[in-house]
Amino acid sequence: MKKRLNDFHNAFLSEIEAALTPEQVRDIEIKYLGKKSDIHLMLKNIGTIENPDEKREMGKIINSTRNEIQKIIEEKREIVEKKSIERKISENHMDWSMPVFSADEGSLHPVTIVQREVESILTGMGFSIVDGPEMETEYYNFEALNIPKFHPARDMQDTFHLVNNMIMRTHTSNCQSRSMEKMKPPLKIIAPGKCFRYEALDASHETAFYQIEGLLVDENINISNLIAVMKILLSEIFRRDVKVRLRPGYFPFVEPGFELDINCLICGGAGCRTCKNSGWLELMPCGMVHPNVLRYGNIDPEKYNGFAFGLGLTRLVMMRYGIADIRLLNGGDLRFLKQFR
Amino acid sequence: MKISIKWLNDFVKISDLNPEEISALLTMKTAETEGIYRKSDFYSGIMTAKILKTVKTDDKHFKCTVLADKEYNVISGAPNTKEGLKTLFVKPGGYLNEIKIAEKSVAGEVSSGMLLSGKEAGINNDHSKLFELDENFQAGLDISEICDYNDSIIEIDNKSLTHRPDLWGIYGFAREISAIFKRPLKNFEVFDSSSEESLPEFPIEIRDKKLCYRYVGAAVKNIKIVQSPINIQVRLFHTGHTPKNIIVDLTNYVMTELGQPLHAFDRNHIEKIVVDTLKKETVYNTLDKVKRTLPSNTLMIQNNEKPVAVAGIIGGEDSEISDSTDSIFLESATFDANHVRKSTVIMGLRTDSSARFEKSLDPENALKGALRFLYLLKKIHPEAKLTHKVTDINYNPFVRNIIHTDYPFIRRLIGERLDNQTIKSILESLEFEVKEDGESVTITAPTFRSTKDISIREDIVEEVSRIYGFDNITPVLPAQKISVPEKNKMNETDNILKDILTYSFSMNETDSHPWYDNKFNKKISYKPQSPVEFKNPISNDNTYLRTSMLPTMLKFAFENLKIYDSFSLYEIGHIFSLNSEERALAIILVDKKSKKGDEAQFFRLKSILQNLSRRLTHEDISFSDPSPHQMINPSISADILLNKESCGFLGALHPQINSLLDKKVNISYCEINMKFFYSMAKTESFKMFSVYPQTLLDFSILKPKEEFYSDFYAKVSSFKHSLIKDIKVISVYEGENIGSNHQSITYRFTIGSNERTLSAEDLTDFQSKFISHLESNNYKLR
Ligand SMILES: [Zn+2]
């Protein structure tokens, strides 16, 4: 019987050695440990041994052989299952560089993109966004901004006139007086929007363009505050420290008035075509709010003062994306629009 | 404005400074400069020369021996070529307006260098003859030794001078430079008229004192109309004038120096000056040889009752200086700025003179200008003689503006610790008078800053801060209370809608002009309903503001169809009527034509709108039968409703559009008034879902085709049952096995309870109740 067991064990060992798949291991398990297996028969037949010591001894050997076989099977199963998974993985090797087929993507207009950025910077600084009409009265566009009839400044911004005696606003500064009438100081507003100038169309002049007007009115506001706020605003917009300079500029609704230039971003100040070789780009008219404008808005200029600025949003968009022809912005051309995803 | 550095140097010493530095500081403190023109970058090698000998080579040309720094053989074809003439000459290798002058062959002869006309030499515009130099100039001198030829000209942006009447002359800039560089300003020398006081007054009458503040007249005899000395011509030419003759040139010269326009009449046409407005519309010939119709009330200069000039703008043809003029009447006056401005607009004519008067000139300069003219004239032509004393009719309404303020205010508004003395000396360098009383100051503006420029204390702050230098002010953030910006519903809503349309529906946002393109409207046969018309349209095709975005979007679609077959565009734009302005959302869908493609587009649009409104509220937008629209297919369209009020429409474009296009496409359009979205409020709350298993039950119900779906659905959904969690349509079927008169609508009910797991009885109970509800409404299950 011992020999039979030994032969059985050896046969098992050579078969399990050759097994490669989990199926083969399962077949071997059934053959060697199943109900019809030899070892099962041997265990059944153990009762025929008469010598109790021999009987016990044999039982022990059979059991330990069975346990060992069981153990080897488990080990083998683990190995072949692992190999089998590895084989499956390697058989399904994929080319990750194959192309994908994407659907059309939508786009935001570049003005929307840059406008959101600037709005988020300014609202972060505490400015509220206000709106005003594009079709405006001469009062809000001119009179309330200290630009009386026949003032030469009306010449500087040639105006679209309408048969209903209204005009197309020439700047979003029309929101200054509109806001002062509604809100009390301290006042911190920005007015983004489209403005219109009656001038011939070419690559750098549009009859319509976007502007963001800003207005801050509080007690004890001064020029030094204006410079500081403008510097922060521009550094945020251009995402780096920008060199700015302030020079006198004349706008009837501010006094003193300034032109704010930034160091040319294209040539870095050395002089190029964009900056007409000056090294500077005119970016933002600004100034201390004229007391007359405060009066028009029912704010006491003895108690309050403030500053205003006009950021050329269209200009900013063109600088940001390197758009040379302003007319592309209003053309509705998908070859242009699709680039701003 | 062109500013000559050499000319400036007459009034403030700047010959040691480089023009770039002056230009940069003017930009930073006074007015924007646009560039520097250096004569020597364009011209060189020009000398004084004498023609020693001429030999005629053909009927036009002379072979000349010319003495400059040495003798040259030069060919000249000018009519005034003659022996002994002193003129200008460019050596071989010299430059004329950037062109190198080489030895070259003229009429078969070699010419070394060139004899020059005034135009060639860059001195005037006369190309009819050689420039004639005064006899007393020596030959062989570089031109820069006899005049301010090698000058640098700073170009000033006129727009930055609109508020500064004092800066329309070089002397004004000299004053600024003297303040900026802290250098003394030299006196502006004028004719001393005290010796002529015994002469009679010239008859001058100002009838309209509101429009003419001051009129200074001088009558001068012994005048010879000759060319001006070379330096006057050079200076005038460099500053943008065309030299003509000594009288015209001197009026321009004084205007360029002082900013005060002068006008010289031929004295033979002037007996008595009357300044008055026209009583009726009048046709008048101005000296530019144009017949002009002037409206009544235009201010005129008259000889008695006969007009001789349009005041402040342009002289008349018949009183102009001519070559035979031997005596002149000089006008130096001040006119009302607004009046001059209005007249230039009406006449469509702007002159150097009107450009200055528009700026509100200082009437003090009227007298100064006349006396400066006489001073210069007497220096050049000592024989010129006044026949009358300089007559000054003065109704100057301006007074020197006085501003009461205090040093602390000035410091506070600048935000910089400037000491009193710095403030005071800056103001004094600009000719303000400053009287101190402790910290208070009384500042008197000079006359030339009092006509409109300086009137309030903020103006004083500007003067101090600009000369001090804006760059020297330390930036300090404002000390303010923290406040949270107010929310802007329109802005937020626009942004939400744009994000959804762009990123969820893959649309492209456009931006367009708010006016119609009449040509396109005609092409698509679109007739806008009472649009607002422009008084001054940018072109004849853009005469109306849009009342709808449709033509704009359709035009974009047409353009893009040249390249793309299928796309969707949107824009939130403004639309206008006579007394209102609204914001509208426009969406246009374009796809290749397919069967029922227009219906598919319609429902795509409908689902987009529902999606948008659900994002902003929890409710669905509602729709109704379409109102007629000229561009929309009446069979495939609907109106959009808000509180039973129509606020937009959607639909397939009218099939007539397709005949205009080569490509076969379906186009759908939707326009909705944005106020609909702005008025929506979203209530945000959470409802606990059921944690028990839920059951899905599908019912396919037969609907007669002719029944309007919303009526059908109203009846189906009138079934109320406590276990209904949700109802969805999952399919609409039309086909043979249900008969041609019906559609099968399949609803999926989600059934469940928040308290328990449903039992089989619950479901059979629900089913039988729903089926009997359908039966009572005469519907059958499929
Ligand atoms: Zn540059």
Image (cartoon, coloured by chain):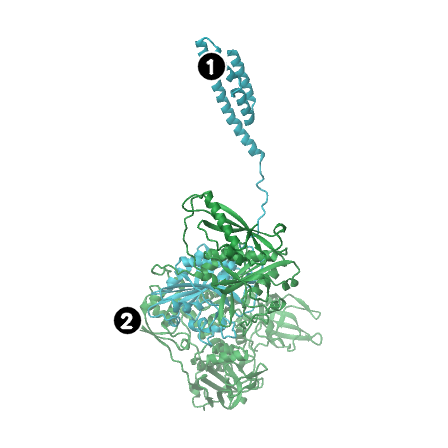
Tell me if B501 is positioned left or right of A307 in this view.
right
Q: Amino acid at mark 2?
A: Gly
Residue extending farthest to the top is A51
Q: Which residue is tagged 1?
A: A61
Instruction: Identify which residue, B464 or A305, lies in the foreground.
Output: A305
Q: Secondary structure at mark 2?
A: loop
Tell me the number on the disc at residue B438.
Answer: 2
Q: Amino acid at mark 1?
A: Ile
Where B638 falls versus A95 (above or below)?
below
- Chain A drawing hue: cyan
Instruction: Identify which residue, B391 or A188, lies in the foreground.
Output: A188
Q: Ligand 1: does it lie within 8 Å of the C-beta at label 2?
A: no
- Chain B drawing hue: green
x%, y% of residue B544?
55, 71
x%, y% of residue B413?
35, 66
Q: Quadrant of residue B529?
A: bottom right
x%, y% of residue A170?
49, 69
Task: Note whether residue A278 is visible.
Answer: no
